[in-house]
Every structure is written in structure tokens, then in C-alpha cells.
């Protein structure tokens, strides 16, 4: 197989095709510390893209509770089990990727979920790790933990669905790096479903083709962020474009959070797909678990995130999450505001570092009544 460079694992690796990076690469960052699992993103995606026949079980966007939530059931533990124990420490990943670990005669190490694996999209929602014994009382940090993990297709640089498809129905757009499945070419072999370790392609039993998250490409083409990003009430998401590390710009909020401050990390980088959805890790979760999800440098990401109140530029980049429906290509901060701009330099959003506060007396003399809200 051809050799390609994967900067997330710090080395060359085997892939089914030659390296061919797009002109721009779709990317998204999600701050897991702000997610409340309201599923607004899930509903927005569902009503926009997957309300048809055969799509009833499809959730191109879902939010699961870790460590026990999955959709489909056990998607990550099953592929990690097939991968076996791998060494993830250090700057260079020494283990095998899903392409390098593929059995003879197969393109990608994968598996096909059973129908029942899709039966419980909210399995273990809000379940925490560990057991609450009789007489247990709260301690700090909390002895129990869980966190929410929103997921979409990662629009990977080296997509397993593209590598696994024998008909080249799955492809990556050169203009924005979004991965799509050509519905005319697809014959429903489900090799993309088998090959994708994140299990984000889905088989439509009515049309007999596979379908997946399309990255809201009509919106992206017109400079707008995705539906799941725009509807997020917690403002946990920022969608834009990411550069390679050697071409990173510190005025691009995606580049700044991924390459400069390194607070945002890819999900399971050891699988070797170079995913382009990044996560700000939950700061309350034990480090060994986070390392498995987000790589060996996750502790540095948590440490940097905790210092955001003292780092105005980092704080400014974080404040731009959910500030505009348009894609922010550039940003800057001044003493009072974080400001986002489009590709041509037009201002899109201006977010104050401090919201104005108005204090009112508890008793309203004019109306002779007490106020329940004094701010």
C-alpha cells in the first residue's frame, strides 16, 4: 500500500491511496465541558437530513454518555478489542492503524454491527463510572464521573469508508474535504459500514445504499456553519477549516485551538484516519481514560484549557463558539472583545469578554412589588 503522512500519529503509515489533501479541509471543534446532552443537535440533523424511509434508525449526529454509552452498541470497544493492546505513549505512535492491522485479503480492520446494535441509541445515558456504595458522600474531585460525547462523521483525511469501498462510491471532495457517498454508484455492499471504526456510515434497507453525514455541504458552500453547530444551545461547537501543522495560521480559530494552544484533540487518533473533528477534553475525567480517547498529550490540553481565564487570545477563540451562523476564517482580540471575520475580512461577530451587568433593587418602588430577578 502507498505510504502517507499522518501528523496526528507523527509518522508515515500505509493507506489504500496516495496522499491527496483537499484545497481546504472541513473541521469542527466541540467543547465537551459545555455539552449537556440536550440532543438539540441530534434533532436538528435528524429533521434536516434523515427523515425518510429507511433512515429511521440513522443518527448522523448523536450524543452518547461515556464511558458506557455507544451508538451503535460498543462501536469503540469492539474495534479497540480487535486492535489489541497498542503503545500510545510518546510523540510518535508505534502501534498499528486499522489499515496496517487489516487481515490478509481485507482493506481495513473492521466489523459489521448487528441490527440489534442500533436498537438503543441512548443506552446508558447519564450512567456514571463506578459503584455508589451505601453511605457514600460527595468528595472533590467527584469519585464518580461520566461525560457527554457528541459525534458526527469526522470527514477524515484518510477515510476508512473511502479505503474500504470496492466501487469508489465514497469519495472526498477536493474543495472542502467533505466525505460523501455517491448514491448512483453505491451498490450497498456495506464495506464502508464495516470499515469505518467510528461507524458513521449507515445502510438504508429501502434504497439499498449506504448513507452518511454530508457535512451540511450546501450550507458550507455558502459560507454557513452546519445545522448541528448553529442549533447548539450550549454553544459548544465551532465549524470551519483546518490547515496542516506547517501551514497553520494563528488568526484561524480552528488552527489556533488545534495547532497552537493544542487544547482540542482528535478522537482515537491511534486508529490512523486523521479525523477532522476535534474535542476539548472533559477536565473532570481521569487521565488514563482520556489518553485512550484523545491521545497521550491530553493532559497538556486539559492544563491549557484550565488557564483560559488568564489567556485572552485563547479565551477569545473559545468565546466565538456559537457567536455567528457564518464560518469564521479569521479572528482577533482586543481589550474588550473577541472579533470574528469571514474569508474576505468582513466582521461576523463581536463578543465581549465581560457581559454588562445591571443591578436592580429588590423592591420596585414604582410598582410596589418585589423582584424575583435582580440582574
Image: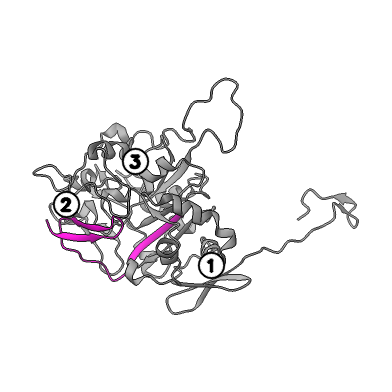
Secondary structure category for the residue under label 1: helix
Give the residue at x 47% y 68%: 326
Q: Earlier in the sequence, mark 1 or mark 3?
A: 3
Front residue of 219 and 273? 273
Write down the region rendered in magenta.
Answer: 1-30
The residue carrying mark 2 is: 165
Local crowd at mark 1 within 10 Å, few (<14), some, or many (≥20)?
A: many
Measured as percent of width and height from the top left, residue 241 is found at: 37, 66
Measured as percent of width and height from the top left, residue 117 is found at: 31, 34
Indicate the quadrant containing the N terminus: top left, top right, bottom left or bottom right.
bottom left
The residue carrying mark 3 is: 57
For marks 3 and 2, give the one nearer the viewer: 2
Distance from Cα at disc 2 to Cα at disc 1: 43 Å
Local crowd at mark 3 within 10 Å, few (<14), some, or many (≥20)?
A: some
The residue carrying mark 1 is: 313
Direction from residue 189 to residue 23 in the image, left or right = right
Local crowd at mark 2 within 10 Å, few (<14), some, or many (≥20)?
A: many
Secondary structure category for the residue under label 3: loop
Direction from residue 156 to residue 61 in the image, left or right = right
Measured as percent of width and height from the top left, residue 177 is found at: 29, 64
Query: Which coloring applies here?
Result: one colour
Amino acid at each position: 500500500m502507498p505510504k502517507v503522512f499522518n501528523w496526528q500519529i507523527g509518522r508515515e503509515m500505509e493507506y489504500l491511496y496516495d496522499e491527496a489533501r483537499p484545497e481546504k479541509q472541513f473541521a469542527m471543534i466541540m467543547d465537551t465541558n459545555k455539552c449537556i446532552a440536550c440532543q438539540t443537535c441530534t434533532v436538528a440533523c435528524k429533521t434536516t437530513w434523515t427523515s425518510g424511509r429507511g433512515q429511521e434508525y440513522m443518527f448522523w449526529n448523536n450524543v452518547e454518555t461515556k464511558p458506557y454509552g455507544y451508538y451503535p452498541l460498543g462501536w469503540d470497544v469492539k474495534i479497540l478489542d480487535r486492535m489489541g493492546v497498542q503503545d500510545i505513549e510518546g510523540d510518535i505512535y508505534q502501534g498499528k492503524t486499522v489499515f496496517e492491522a487489516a487481515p490478509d485479503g481485507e482493506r481495513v480492520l473492521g466489523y459489521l454491527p448487528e441490527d440489534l446494535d442500533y436498537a438503543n441509541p441512548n443506552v446508558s445515558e447519564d450512567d456514571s463510572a463506578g459503584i455508589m456504595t451505601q453511605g457514600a458522600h460527595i468528595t472533590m474531585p467527584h469519585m464518580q464521573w461520566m461525560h457527554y460525547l457528541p459525534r458526527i462523521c469526522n470527514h477524515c483525511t484518510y477515510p476508512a469508508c473511502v479505503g474500504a469501498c470496492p466501487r469508489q462510491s465514497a469519495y472526498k471532495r477536493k474543495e472542502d474535504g467533505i466525505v460523501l457517498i455517491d448514491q448512483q454508484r453505491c451498490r450497498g455492499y456495506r464495506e464502508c459500514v464495516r470499515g469505518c471504526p467510528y461507524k458513521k456510515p449507515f445502510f438504508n434497507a429501502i434504497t439499498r445504499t449506504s448513507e452518511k453525514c454530508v457535512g451540511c455541504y450546501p450550507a458550507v458552500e455558502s459560507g454557513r456553519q452546519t445545522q448541528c453547530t448553529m442549533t447548539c444551545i450550549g454553544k459548544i461547537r465551532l465549524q470551519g477549516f483546518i490547515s496542516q501543522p506547517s501551514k497553520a495560521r494563528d488568526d484561524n480559530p480552528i488552527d489556533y485551538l488545534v495547532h497552537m494552544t493544542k487544547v482540542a484533540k482528535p478522537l482515537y487518533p491511534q486508529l490512523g484516519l486523521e479525523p477532522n473533528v476535534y474535542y476539548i477534553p472533559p477536565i473532570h475525567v481521569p487521565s488514563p481514560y482520556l489518553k485512550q480517547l484523545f491521545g497521550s498529550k491530553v493532559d497538556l490540553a486539559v492544563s491549557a484549557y484550565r488557564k483560559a481565564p488568564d489567556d485572552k487570545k485563547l479565551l477569545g477563540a473559545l468565546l466565538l463558539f456559537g457567536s455567528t451562523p457564518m464560518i469564521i476564517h479569521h479572528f482577533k482580540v482586543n481589550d474588550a472583545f473577541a472579533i470574528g471575520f469571514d474569508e474576505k475580512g468582513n466582521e461576523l461577530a463581536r463578543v465581549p469578554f465581560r457581559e454588562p451587568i445591571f443591578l436592580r433593587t429588590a423592591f420596585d418602588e414604582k410598582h410596589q412589588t418585589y423582584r424575583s430577578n435582580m440582574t
